Image (cartoon, helix red, strand yellow):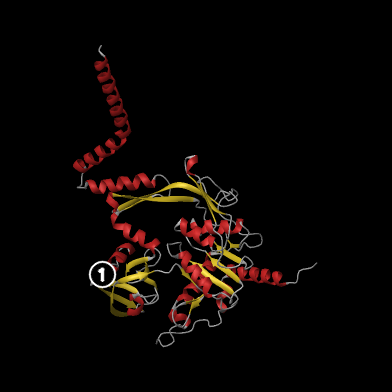
């Protein structure tokens, strides 16, 4: 055989090998495509290949773990809006079955279109643009209320038996991710505790793109007014890992914040604090957590606990120590969200709760010694209700000229219903008292 023929033969063999390997690699994909085609052609009821593909994506990702998912084109905008803290709509939160018997307004964002139009917590939404929505899913009603900026929507409202028609214009609504103790007269938040003004109170609802800046602005506005801080992360299900890192960095001037580890050794990443803090290290901090504090909340709580920068008060956290990456698909119109790493606090203690873990296994974030405060369902409900009342401008007197404005519990006597918050105040007051004692020689 000539040298030229041998070269041709070797090249041909190489091409065959590449084709074989590619065929083996993409065989599962072809099988899925074939199944979609057969089902679309032969299923007893008509179904599109697009719907089948979406179902396949959903099933594939949801089979991985509870935190991986397919974000469809219909959902991507709302998904991004949560973390961007901005969306187009009225600025109203609603709940319906099975939580509430009917579609009910839970809250309206201060100075939002819904707020200015006069919509109120407790209002029942019975119609949207003339369409009866009483039998619809809550998600469907929310979609009807949302819409393009500048467009109008007419809501049929049942307010304590009185039927009202209220029209509002949709706008871009900026969502605040933190709240304070109560509203001031100008509608902004008062971040000083009414019952203990020397203590700052900041409740973070989620960790979004603006959260760290919001907390920094709140703390800077209190400079010289407070000597202790409560960071309330109860019922905060998490959000952006980067936001949690930035929040920790507000209170630390060096050292480890968190580390992440993916499947490969090379994917290890360690994040340390940058020099400088927003508040002096001498200012004590209490972080409130409960069983719904998860993910980014646990990053913050575990970091500040391990670095001896905060006392953790409340109940054991949820135990979600995984990081999800969001990858655009379908030309950026949709996305896949799946777990790519686990995170670990400075101590290296595992946060993630595995399916077979019991209460005696190490997971989540535990309260500091002497700071565990367990709440019953009724006590939890009372604590949440107190926070809702104090955030409502109509209930705390912030809108004194409003005909329905009524100062509710002006001395905050109902703080006694929140025993976790009360315990955090007690601990901080004790720490402040201890630090003010003269040092012995």
Measuring from the top left, give residue 325's x and y in whole percent: 41, 50
Residue at the top extreme? 1
Q: Position of residue 282 (x, y in %)?
A: 64, 67
Left of 210 or right of it: where is 18?
A: left
Q: Is residue 161 visible?
A: no
Query: Which image quadrant: the N terminus?
Result: top left
Residue occupying image coordinates x 34% and y 66%: 87
Q: Nearer the viewer, residue 224 or 307?
A: 224
Q: How many marks?
A: 1
Which residue is most to the right?
441
**At x 30% / y 79%, what residue is drawn?**
163
Q: Which residue is mark 1?
A: 132
Name the image quarter holding the C terminus.
bottom right
Q: Is residue 127 left or right of residue 268?
A: left
x and y, in percent, of residue 400 in the image: 44, 87
Is residue 295 among what the camera can see? yes
User: How dense is the environment of label 1, judged by Cα within 10 Å: few (below 14), some, or many (20 and up)?
Assistant: few
Q: Is residue 273 above or below residue 215?
A: above
Q: Secondary structure at mark 1?
A: strand
In which quarter of the view is residue 275 placed?
Answer: bottom right
């Amino acid at each position: 055989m000539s040298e030229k023929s041998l070269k041709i033969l070797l090249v041909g063999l190489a091409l065959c090998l590449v084709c074989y390997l590619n065929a083996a690699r993409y065989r599962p994909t072809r099988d899925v495509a074939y199944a979609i085609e057969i089902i679309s052609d032969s299923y007893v009821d008509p179904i599109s290949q697009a719907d089948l593909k979406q179902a396949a994506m959903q099933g594939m990702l949801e089979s991985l773990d509870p935190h991986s998912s397919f974000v469809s084109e219909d959902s991507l905008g709302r998904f991004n809006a949560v973390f961007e803290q901005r969306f187009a709509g009225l600025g109203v939160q609603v709940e319906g079955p099975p939580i509430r018997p009917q579609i009910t307004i839970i809250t309206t964002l201060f100075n939002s279109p819904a707020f200015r139009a006069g919509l109120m917590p407790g209002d029942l939404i019975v119609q949207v643009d003339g369409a009866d929505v009483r039998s619809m899913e809550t998600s469907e009603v929310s979609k009807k209320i949302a819409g393009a900026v500048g467009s109008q929507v007419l809501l049929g409202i049942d307010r304590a038996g009185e039927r009202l028609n209220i029209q509002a214009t949709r706008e871009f609504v900026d969502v605040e991710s933190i709240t304070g103790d109560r509203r001031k007269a100008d509608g902004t938040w008062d971040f000083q505790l009414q019952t203990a003004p020397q203590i700052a109170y900041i409740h973070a609802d989620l960790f979004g793109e603006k959260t760290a800046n919001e907390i920094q602005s709140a703390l800077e506005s209190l400079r010289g007014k407070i000597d202790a801080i409560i960071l309330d992360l109860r019922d905060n299900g998490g959000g952006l890992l980067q936001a949690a890192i930035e929040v920790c960095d507000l209170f630390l001037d060096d050292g480890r914040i968190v580390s992440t580890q993916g499947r490969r050794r090379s994917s290890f990443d360690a994040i340390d604090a940058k020099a400088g803090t927003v508040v002096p290290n001498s200012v004590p901090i209490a972080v409130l957590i409960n069983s719904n504090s998860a993910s980014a909340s646990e990053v913050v709580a575990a970091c500040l606990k391990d670095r001896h920068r905060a006392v953790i008060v409340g109940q054991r956290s949820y135990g979600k120590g995984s990081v999800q990456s969001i990858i655009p698909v379908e030309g950026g119109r949709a996305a896949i969200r799946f777990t790519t790493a686990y995170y670990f606090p400075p101590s290296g203690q595992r946060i993630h709760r595995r399916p077979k873990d019991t209460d005696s296994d190490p997971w989540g974030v535990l309260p500091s010694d002497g700071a565990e405060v367990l709440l019953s369902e009724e006590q939890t409900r009372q604590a949440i209700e107190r926070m809702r009342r104090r955030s409502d401008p109509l209930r705390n007197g912030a809108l004194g000229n409003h005909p329905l404005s009524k100062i509710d519990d002006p001395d905050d006597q109902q703080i006694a219903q929140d025993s976790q918050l009360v315990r955090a105040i007690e601990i901080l007051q004790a720490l402040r008292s201890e630090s003010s004692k003269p040092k012995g020689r």
